[in-house]
Image: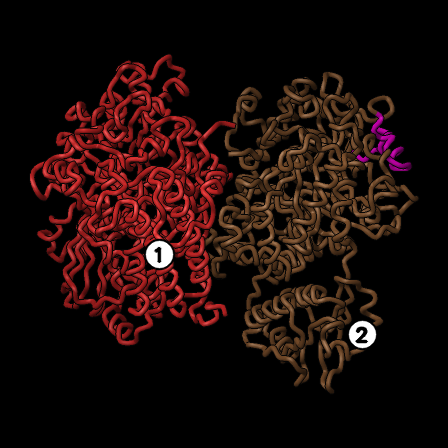
Chain colours: A red, B brown
Amino acid sequence: MNPGQAHTPAPEDGYQLWLRYPRIDDAPTLAAYRAALTQVVIDAVSPTLLAAQEELDLALKRMLGVAIPIEKQVRRDGALIVGAARSSPTIAALNLQDTLRQVGREGFVITRAQARGKNCLVIAANSDIGALYGVFHFLRLLQTHRPLDVWPVISAPRIRYRVLNHWDNLDRTIERGYAGFSLWDWHKLPDYLDPRYKDYARANASIGVNGALLTNVNASPLILTRPYLIKAAALAEVFRPYGIRVFLAPRFTAPMELGRLKTADPLDSAVADWWKRLAEEIYALIPDFGGFVVKANSEGQPGPHDYGRSHADGANVLAEALAPQGGVVFWRAFVYDHNVPEDRHKQAYSQLTPDDGRFRENVLLQVKNGPIDFQPREPFHPLFGAMPKTSLALEVQITQEYLGCATHLVYLAPLFKETLDADTYCQGPGSTVARVVDGSLDGRALSGIAGVANTGDERNWCGHPFAAANWFAFGRLAWDHRLTAEEIAEDWLRMTFTNDAQFVEPARAMMIGSREAVVKYMTPLGLHHIMAQGHHYGPGPWVDQGRPDWTSVYYHRADSGGIGFDRTPTGSDAVSQYFPPYRDRVANIETCPEELLLWFHHVPWQHRMKSGRTLWDELCHVYNSGVEAVREMQRTWDALAEFVDAARFEHVRALLRIQEQEARWWRDACLLYFQTFSGLPIPPQYERPAHTLDHYLRLTHYYVPGIREWRLG
Amino acid sequence: MNPGQAHTPAPEDGYQLWLRYPRIDDAPTLAAYRAALTQVVIDAVSPTLLAAQEELDLALKRMLGVAIPIEKQVRRDGALIVGAARSSPTIAALNLQDTLRQVGREGFVITRAQARGKNCLVIAANSDIGALYGVFHFLRLLQTHRPLDVWPVISAPRIRYRVLNHWDNLDRTIERGYAGFSLWDWHKLPDYLDPRYKDYARANASIGVNGALLTNVNASPLILTRPYLIKAAALAEVFRPYGIRVFLAPRFTAPMELGRLKTADPLDSAVADWWKRLAEEIYALIPDFGGFVVKANSEGQPGPHDYGRSHADGANVLAEALAPQGGVVFWRAFVYDHNVPEDRHKQAYSQLTPDDGRFRENVLLQVKNGPIDFQPREPFHPLFGAMPKTSLALEVQITQEYLGCATHLVYLAPLFKETLDADTYCQGPGSTVARVVDGSLDGRALSGIAGVANTGDERNWCGHPFAAANWFAFGRLAWDHRLTAEEIAEDWLRMTFTNDAQFVEPARAMMIGSREAVVKYMTPLGLHHIMAQGHHYGPGPWVDQGRPDWTSVYYHRADSGGIGFDRTPTGSDAVSQYFPPYRDRVANIETCPEELLLWFHHVPWQHRMKSGRTLWDELCHVYNSGVEAVREMQRTWDALAEFVDAARFEHVRALLRIQEQEARWWRDACLLYFQTFSGLPIPPQYERPAHTLDHYLRLTHYYVPGIREWRLG
């Protein structure tokens, strides 16, 4: 029997993301909304207000099933007034100055007010973009069937720069992209503007994302040539009404490759002049250009070290070029060198902390959530809290490079929150990563967060129907990191599928549990970086060739005595980079959270875990419970058939089948491999591996998505 | 003013192609259809009949706005009976045997009949797939608002194998693809079946395409490994109800690369055995597997010559392996070698005619329409008519490798028809290419036609909103090459946009003229192969480096004395490969059609043309008239705004702007370059080139779509 047969909802392809605006299907709610909204009043004119107007028109028509007139003047009770105090006479007359002072350039207020003697709702801001954000917030309340009596809403973003980083190559392949190919059709730009560009901007504005790095940080210098700048400017023009600034990734040696200089030494005045002229050229084409995102001296990219200069020197030459026009530099802290014998965990801290205080004011140091590389679970990066005189931006990965590509259902908000909420203790308890990043801990004005995008040209944008939740969650947390993973999941489910609680509650529980599931079937108990080499698809704990710090054995260090990386003072002493009491807690095998045990300790196979099981038995147990968790997700989803249209239901169902297969693949391959060290049997209560270790060792995968590097021609 | 403002039709994205089925907007027609159709009767069961039923249900509901019941028995006047005589008792009782004998396995009859005392319409066939083709024909009549009194329709395909050749690589890039990336998501196959696969099959079945070569003829051996065969089988399963057989492109050295044999010599028995076992493995997975399409000893691909064997030897070893299960081999005749000094025009004929009669019965020799390579205009290939003991399939290119990618509006049916209707005179007048290809000239049972597909993952399938017309035209002509380019264009326009004659007539004229326009602004008067090297994007008449037969100077031979390739007996004598009187007509500069003049002759700059102009002035004139033709297309399109939804209207408009720019680029670059030989001025009545020749010479394009070759890892 095909569970698809029972569906009634019309087929959907996911293109509309969380902006579907279906007719409100709850009669009392619909009646209340219709009664509360009689007209929209927008009395000023700008591209951003036009966008707000278009969105309201589209959304209200669809959700309420009636056309709400959009007018210049309040005429009736139930008017919804939208605008900025600066440009809208109607808003200016409402005396909201005190409230508006709290919300800054991008925030908004939604409140009740009297205007021309009528009872009105007001979405007011200090700028048009603030008003647009307020409109999307208001529409979200309607989409999620909230009562219209929760006023005032006073909302402002806690982080200034909320940027998607697209690792898109100019040939439209996407590094670590699993949802097809790049959204940017460079060949037809600037002449043809795919309508999708605008829908991309709408989606971002609806969650508060205000920046987009268009191309891969493993950068082609071509992106800085005039033809490509003109193409980028065409995208910037589409994005501008939606408050999204374009960023570009410069190759550090561009002054040589494009400018024919003999050096790219950041302290060379000809080099500095070259960057300045480039910045001028860019700003002439893109007046609101956001700035540069730079990967330098990292994984083969050129950088200031090639000239004996520091990261600060490298970042500052770019920052100076951008400063006159207000641009910023995101300088990535993802730096490590396999020629350096030090634990990779420690290298960014070692390299960068000496530069604290040396970066220009318009530089942000962009630090990944953990010290290695976007693993299913990492401790927070020790740089957070360690550079109080530097603006530290957080970089998270929305695309699932190490989390099952876009075929595994993994909701990432719990992962993002785990980092944001982590306490660095740098200024005592409560010194969370979030407070470092939003600048509140050190009183820094500049703040930023970057998410490596999971978008591509697949119809539903992100490949897996649930992967859009991670884009959504990134934006929502970038705006307000105090939101919980649960409430974000709930909003997303209601907007993406249905408000029916019988659907939302089990689906939300499935989402919340999904991140722990993937940790369990891939990298339990603090294991990390044990995936296949290069494409990172599937398990590869046996990888021991090539750059040592790109092997798996470097990280798991399994031997007959035990498994895990000793990062205590008896080992690499990476723990010393953390502040106490966190440092002491993880350094002690007794107090170290078991979920990070093998990250910080080399642990004997017979070590007794809190469960009472030995480490080996616990490893078997957790790997198996990961597989079981996926099967539970399958059961949950199957039971939700009636709430979802057949197309999306079957899509998720097919991908959950793949996820279950691959969870078993991970479990069986890893346990068989680690068993060669432990010499212990897999306890009888668990499933036997489907194949021999040799089978898993021989599996070869070609043409895995997401691995092509840029190249010319 | 934005012409988009005036539109009333709802925005469309082109995904539905010519199967949109909009509500019939002409009241008398709608009333007539509703009256004529009261029920659908399908009394047999098969996946193909289920597809027919689904299509009728979808289409009639949308077009008529009422649900027509689908039942097992005739109950009312106005029943539409659908089925095959073999399986449907209702059809069997109608005594249509005599008519059905005329239509073979795939044909159909649409006629009136009495069943159970009721007046019925009947779509009858000898097989379920014939019935499905009849359903699509019937729906086309409704979509184009034809009266329902044109019975009987008796239709059967004139060509047995009607195959799309996808040059899709396993990394999803497409060689010479300009509409995004491959439709086939190998990574998620076989587990996830994108709904698009079925829509692809529907589109093909609706125009009679019955085969799909899934991947590039520049073949990766991996496609023949079991994991990929299982993926291909999953696609075959989706396609099967729609009558589409899967073909694969084997690499000739696969017995070595996959089978670890020491040789791929086709006369080696171990090699023959390896191919047999492979065929058995494939047929076990894909019982209706179509066969192989092979590019061998061509442009670096391995082949039988590497072992001192002939093309027939190479084709036959594969054909023998496939024969037991009824598979066929398409062996490509696109063979030439730059180590051979002979005019490339002549080489395929020289290499292959000695093999006539040596190919197995289940081999088709797949011959491109012209002797060089899909140029905007070529004479027909001299192999047509020259190998009476061999089944010759025609290969045309639907994708626009040399015709402006998917950014130029070029309707290709006139090009296809020019070849099909060309008279080879091999058996006297009337020995057209079409009659060679359909087998009627030599009484051959096996016949085939291949079209290099222009599909990709762009939302509208083919990139340019008008490019789908070329896919459509290929299928329609493959089914019946007597159709005119005009009637195919009219059907497509009506189905794709609107039946309004005020739209259809100018739009059809624009389509019909578009092929001659591109000839004029790219390669007028018989010029050919003067495009940029490698990616083939834009003009490159100056290309003179690399393999001589891949340069432009090899083909245009411009010098101070004149321009053109002397292929008469005083030159390469390629004309000798044609039959008289065609041979004599083109060999004589006085009788050679001017549109092919420089193809066959080296002509002095001062040669007097029929217009009275010198050759140089004529060249200037024709290049300019090509640009003017594009401007006329722009004017035509702009005047049609009210008939087209804003999204598709603006898309076409933007692409026409690109086309006009690129037409000027071609004109200016070519005239400036050829002027260096003629030494003559561009007559004053024509536009001056926008830049110097040096400007055009220096233009460098990276990341042009469609050029990546397959590679591992």
**The disc labelled 2 sits on which kind of residue?**
Leu
User: Dot 2 corresponds to which residue?
Assistant: B96
Query: Is A364 positioned to the left or the right of B211 in the image?
Result: left
- Which mark is in front, 2 or 1? 1
Residue drawn 50% across the image and 29% down it? B702
Instruction: Identify the image quadrant of residue B182.
Output: top right
Image location of residue B45, percent across then percent down: 65, 72
Chain of the residue displaying label 2: B
The magenta region covers: B573-595
Image location of residue B553, percent across then percent down: 69, 22
Query: Is B139 positioned to the left or the right of A604 in the image?
Result: right
SS state under label 2: loop
Disc 2 to disc 1, how far (Cα)? 67 Å
Chain of the residue displaying label 1: A
**The disc labelled 1 sits on which kind of residue?**
Gln
Q: Nearer the viewer, residue A73 or B379?
A: B379
Looking at the image, the residue that sits furthest to the left is A428
Q: Tell if the residue under mark 2 belongs to the same chain as the one under mark 1.
A: no
User: Dot 1 corresponds to which residue?
Assistant: A685
Magenta span has B576?
Answer: yes
SS state under label 1: loop
Q: Nearer the viewer, residue A96 or B66?
A: B66
State whether residue B610 appears in this view: no
Residue drawn 53% across the image and 42% down it? B172
